[in-house]
Image (cartoon, rainbow, N blue to C red):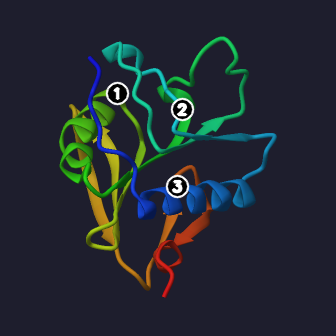
Amino acid sequence: ELCEMSPIGFSHSAIVSFITSWSIRNTAPNQVVIRSQCPIQLNVLASVPEPDIVWARQGNYFQRHPVVDEVLLLVEIAESSLRTDRGKKKKIYAEAGIQDYWIVNIPDRVVEVFREPENGQYQAIQTYKIGESIAVLASPEISLPVADLWPP
């Protein structure tokens, strides 16, 4: 199934670029591959979404896309796609077993974090606001200050 999408806006593009750069600066290149708007393979669902940002375990992705067990962090940037990212995508990611799913909610200037997928639902849901930081589940020593996503 192909999904028609609105063009990416200025804020969306800026945040994708920022999180990509932040991710590269804060991860070990011999352990983590940062993928921006590239597919992942959700084997159980035969689905190949293209999230905005994925941290994947280091691997050879010339012959295949990362699979769920290799995804350490998945981030969607949401402006016009907020309903889809909170609905259909969240359900797909939970059913597949994505452990750390973040939605950067541009209209509300928050980051919604979904963890502990079980029976197609995330059990742990938390919203982080400006002034707070989010630790990456797979690397708790790495955290993103929410305020850094939006310049003053």
Kind of element beneath mark 3 = helix
Comes first in the chain, label 1 or label 2: 2
Of tags 3 and 1, which is closer to the observer? 3
Kind of element beneath mark 2 = loop
The answer to whether residue 65 is seen in the rendering is yes
Of tags 1 and 2, which is closer to the observer? 2
* Residue type (three-letter) at the residue carrying disc 2: Cys
Quadrant of the rendered image containing residue 2: top left
Comes first in the chain, label 3 or label 2: 3
Q: Which mark is residue 57?
A: none
Q: Quadrant of the N terminus?
A: top left
Q: Which residue is mark 3?
A: 16
Task: Answer left or right for 125 relative to 11.
Answer: left
Q: Residue at x 39, y 56 (%)?
A: 9
* 148 shown above or below 134: below
Q: Nearer the viewer, residue 7 or 152?
A: 7
* 16 shown above or below 92: below
Label 3 close to label 2 by CB (< 8 Å):
no
Q: Residues within 10 Å of mark 1 (few under 14, many from 20)?
A: many
Q: Nearer the viewer, residue 138 or 150?
A: 150
Q: Which residue is mark 1?
A: 96
Task: Answer left or right for 139 relative to 46.
Answer: right
* Residue type (three-letter) at the residue carrying disc 1: Ala
Q: Which residue is mark 2?
A: 38
User: Residues under labels 3 and 2: Cα distance?
Assistant: 12 Å
Q: Residue at x 54, y 32 (%)?
A: 38
Q: Position of residue 26 (x, y in %)?
A: 71, 60
* Residue type (three-letter) at the residue carrying disc 3: Val
User: Residues under labels 3 and 1: Cα distance?
Assistant: 23 Å
